[in-house]
Image (tube, rainbow, N blue to C red):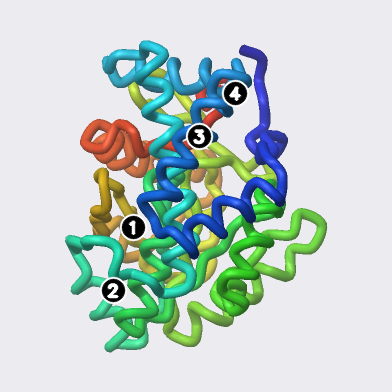
Amino acid sequence: MSEERWQEVREKGSVLGILLVAAVARLLGRRAAGLLVRVVAAWYALLHPRVRGASRGYLRRLGAPARLRDVLHHVSTFAQVTTDRLFLVRGDVGRFRFSREGEEILVGLRDRRQGALLLLAHLGSFEVLRALSVDRSLPVSVLGYFENARRLNGVLRRVAPGVDARLIPIRPDDPSFVFEVEDRIRAGEMVGTMGDRVGFDGKSTAAPFLGAWARFPTGPYLLAAALRCPVYLAFGLFRAPDRYHLVCEPFAESVVLPRGPGREAALGDLAARYARRLEHHCRSYPDNWFNFYDFWSAA
């Protein structure tokens, strides 16, 4: 498979199709919507060989079966988690069972008004973190590039018009979003950002992940060093049929990067630590990894 930037992987399906799923979810509930998206997921996987190839490659690196039915299950899990966002963004959390590990970390940050960076991943659902942050009055925003999912995000805005309030969009041609991140962290808030996809700036380092080298972004660590804020890991892990497990872990009380040749080595060490924890959770929740492109091609 040739090298492919994740920003180039556009969402499949039409606005009409997404609206149909949203309508079924609203009128008939989560179970009916889940049946519909399983059919959609099967179509998606069968008609897109790159999706099948990416899923198979990931599952094989885990040492898991990578038959067609395993790929279909993997993609169906992604579809279910995506559909669940329709409920989570409007605060309809009663449909789910939640467990929490390390929630006291987030509560402590809130109570101390301590700003922090939360390292997320395309593993499970970051929407769980946002939904539970509202439920627990935790000031959490999410920094990310959302342009490659404009159709879905447009539907989410229809379902919950205030959904953008806690999103900080990355604008490749306008770095001013960094000041918005700084303002929120200085105000004692938490900002989540993905630690598993290299951004438009290309700043990255290689780290071992699932038995091979892969590239991870260095932007989060550079940002944490500049803002002198602590860093934590946070994942919203899905277990069928309706359970989400929110995990928050300490990562770095501070990020201090040396100048000179040691800087790249320090960034590599941070990325490797992140990759080890990500691998741990991938092995615990193997169907939750949602990077459907050749993640290892650019290493």
Secondary structure beneath label 3:
loop
Secondary structure beneath label 4:
loop
Ranked by sequence position, the earlier of labels 4 and 3 is 3
Q: Position of residue 45 (x, y in %)?
A: 54, 24
Is the Cβ of the residue at disc 1 closer than 8 Å to that at disc 3?
no
Quadrant (top left, top right, bottom left, bottom right) of the C terminus: top right
Instruction: Report, in whole angstroms, how far the alpha carbon at label 1 lies from the one at label 2.
Output: 10 Å
Residue hosting label 2: 106
**Three-letter code for the amino acid on which mark 1 is drawn:** Ala
Secondary structure beneath label 2:
helix
Instruction: Report, in whole angstroms, how far the alpha carbon at label 4 lies from the one at label 3.
Output: 14 Å
**Three-letter code for the amino acid on which mark 4 is drawn:** Ala
Instruction: Report, in whole angstroms, how far the alpha carbon at label 3 lies from the one at label 2.
Output: 27 Å
Between label 3 and label 2, give the one nearer the viewer: 3
Instruction: Report, in whole angstroms, how far the alpha carbon at label 1 lies from the one at label 3.
Output: 17 Å
**Crowdedness near tag 3: few (<14), some (14–19) or many (≥20) residues, C-alpha within 10 Å:** some
